[in-house]
Amino acid sequence: MGEQLHGGFGVSRALTALGVEQIFTLSGGHIFPIFDACHNDGIRIVDVRHEQTAGYAAEGWARLTRKLGVAAVTAGPGVTNVMSPLAQAGFNGAPLLVLAGRAPAFRWGKGSLQEIDHVPFVDPLARARTIMDPAQVAAGVIDAAVDALGAPRGPAFVDFPLDVIFSTTEVSVPDVEVPAPPRPDPRVIEEVARLVSAAARPVVIAGSNLWLDRADEALLGFVEAAEIPVFANGQGRGCVPADHRLAFARSRSRALKEADVVIVAGAPVDFRLGFGEAFADGARVVHLESHSSLLTDNVPLAAAVGAPLDVTLGALADALSSPADTKEWVEVLRSEEEVRHAAAQVELSSPQTPIHPMRVYGELSKVLDRDAIVIGDGGDFVSYAGREVASYEGGSWLDPGPYGCLGCGPGYAIAARLAHPGRQVCLLLGDGALGFSGMDLETLVRLRLPVVIVVGNNGIWGLEKHPMKALYGYDVAADLRPGIRYDQMMIAFGGRGELVTDPEALGGALRRAFDSGEPYLVNVLTDSGVAYPRSANLA
């Protein structure tokens, strides 16, 4: 008979077999055995101030590294607090595993502390299970991880009753076997290649699953072979460097209205693409996704492939008999880009006070390294960043994604700094978003994780205030206290910070922040009268 160990070692040994380097957590007695085992087995325990942040840090780790992200939370409120990260991971296709405590099975129904059955309310968001046998803890963790990592990727959840995880047993870890995803149909690949070769005005929309499928190099090879302009959203940003001759950003509306072939790769045809209604009449639409369950039915498709995007795009590049004749089309879009870029320079260098939010990005672009990781957590302030901050490498941009849950930024920043200790990490926060998880700025200080936080502080919920006023002539529930000294809050936590009210002082403040090597908050008072110009809201 082998060594008798408590159930926490079933968790830690399974995580070790999965290559997990750390868990993100908040302390709770129901999961003490997991802490004990991870501590003894050399798995780092990263403790934060709110379970929501633990979940977002694990989701951010998964999206940045393309590996399993793991959060461990206590029973009851620990689980309910991590529901938003579970939902966001589902929308983002992030392989997130949440491990949770649970009230003891032998007293179930008698009113133990935090006694609630998690599985019925978690299961709609994440594949969920309860492990009732101490000998099956390791196998349960492996099975849940395989669920998260297998196609289609997404969140998984497993909880352990207190008496199960504290019980001793012989720990046995099964092999990790993630099922191989389907291969693309060669006939469909040939059909898509024919569509591309015959197109006069093709475009590619590159989304987050391209990065998560490790298809960034394959995408670049395909678009260069086909001579197709590329527009990126989400983590598709940077898969084709922003300064590449086929990378475009500002001319997307025109491109979609005039394109004869639209290839949506690794992105849903959702509100960000006008549900497909933004496409030209008669455009041939091709949807490439990493799994058939992700393919759209919002628009009629000329072709669709649900298979790993690295394989699909590599096969498409090989199948092209000749590139599309897109020289004139590329020149049209490039001209549009240049006109719009020139128009933006006025706001990017605006001398106005209160500071125009675009001036923030005009100055930030001068101090960001080419491989900087930029994280967006906010409404209007981050919308400007999405338009103006260029990405040159895959995995260098992180935002909430289509679920749009604010408060994810500090967790994402913790994950980014741990994943990439040698790169700049910049967290862009709206002052509204900061209110969701601002206490976890203390976590950055306590764990000595240098991150530059730039707060766009306009004292309002800008994404709501301006549209409501336009609809009704007035607004409610959209104001914050103006001029809050979030820089002083950061200093109180033990970090560094400064207030910026003069646009000419922005550049110096940002340089000091990046040079400091410490968690540093730059609190920028921006103009509450400036609204991001949107063509649509909500749906």
Image (cartoon, rainbow, N blue to C red):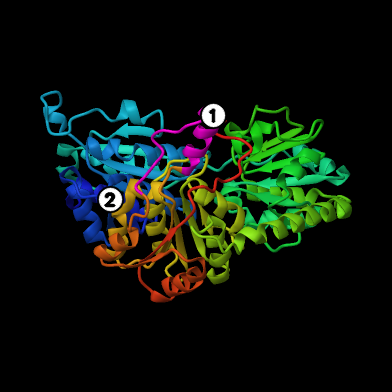
Q: Is residue 535 above or below residue 251?
A: above
Q: Which mark is residue 25?
A: 2
Look at the image and tell me whether residue 340 can be seen. Answer: yes
Q: As drawn, which residue projects farthest toward the top?
A: 109
Are the residues tagged 1 and 2 within 8 Å (C-beta)? no
Report the residue at 57% width, 46% height from top.
532
Look at label 1 and name its amino acid. Leu
Q: Which mark is residue 70?
A: none
Q: Nearer the viewer, mark 1 or mark 2?
A: 1
Q: Secondary structure at mark 1?
A: helix
Front residue (pair 341, 425): 341
Report the residue at 37% width, 58% height from top.
414
Report the residue at 86% width, 46% height from top.
197
Question: Label 1 belongs to which residue?
Answer: 471
3D distance between C-alphas at marks 1 and 2: 42 Å
Please give left or right for residue 323 compared with residue 518 in the image.
Answer: right
For disc 1, the neighbor class at 10 Å (few under 14, some 14 to 19, many from 20) is few
Magenta residues span 462-481
Report the residue at 19% width, 42% height from top.
165
Q: Give the quarter of the figure containing the C terminus.
A: top right
Whole-percent x and y of residue 83? 35, 37
Whole-percent x and y of residue 242? 66, 60
Specify the quadrant of the image occupied by residue 486: bottom left
Specify the quadrant of the image occupied by residue 286: top right
Front residue (pair 258, 210): 258
Q: Is residue 201 above or below residue 355?
A: above
Whole-percent x and y of residue 249? 68, 52
Front residue (pair 529, 490): 529
Whole-percent x and y of residue 235? 56, 51
Earlier-in-chain disc, 1 versus 2:
2
Please give left or right for residue 18 compared with residue 397 in the image.
Answer: left
